[in-house]
Image: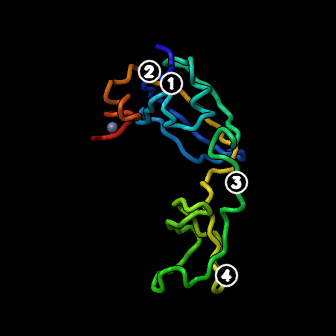
Amino acid sequence: MQIEAQKVVTLNYTLTDSSGKVIDQSNDGSFAYLHGASNIIPGLENALAGKTSGDALNVSVEPAEGYGERDPAKTQSVPREMFPEDAEIEVGMQFHAQGPNGETLVVTVVSVEGETVTVDGNHPLAGEQLNFAVEVVEVREASAEELDHGHVHGAGGHDH
Ligand code: ZN
């Protein structure tokens, strides 16, 4: 069965960045997605179209087809007093904040200098070229309920 819209696809994959560092991987058949429902980044989804179980491929995804380019406007310095007084603010901590257009975004603390905290609202993988080594484990028809929800149920998917 070929990968196309309305198919559930189980993948094994290893994701590395441009320096070869492993960012993420799943090699036990526990990752599944619904094709054509934007469950995964466009660059990977497009490369998988037409593949079938047993196929192995390497996919290199540019930021525009991945998590987007880094947006410098999403990095900002805020006074320490904006954070709870009793909280220890450390690099790597994440908070919910309001973005430039009023949207809610997750920001990551990138530096703390004196009374100034710098936070970054970009996705951690924004601006990164992403290299996937992918093996297609299984392709099956999605159920009506999965199509209705827009995601996979059961093994590798939502448990509800
Ligand atoms: Zn569901």
Q: In this view, does 4 lie above or below 30?
A: above
Q: Name the residue under label 4.
A: 113
Cα distance in 3D space between marks 4 and 2: 51 Å
- Three-letter amino acid code of the residue under disc 4: Glu
Ranked by sequence position, the earlier of labels 4 and 3 is: 3
Q: In this view, does 134 lie above or below 21?
A: above
Q: Do the residues bearing badges 3 and 1 touch, measured as CB atoms within 8 Å? A: no
User: Distance between the Cα atoms at labels 3 and 1?
Assistant: 30 Å
Q: Do the residues labelled 1 and 2 touch (CB within 8 Å)?
A: yes
Q: In which quarter of the image is residue 133?
A: top right
Q: Distance between the residues labelled 1 and 4?
A: 47 Å
- Residue type pointed to by label 3: Arg
Identify the secondary structure beneath mark 3. Answer: loop
Q: How far apart are marks 2 and 3 (CA)?
A: 34 Å
At label 3, counting other C-alpha atoms closer than 10 Å, the crowd grade (few under 14, some 14-19, many 20 or more) is some
Quadrant position of ligand 1: top left
Estimate the x, y position of residue 138 in percent, counting from the top left: 43, 22
Mark nearest the camera among 1 and 4 is 4
Residue underneath mark 2: 139
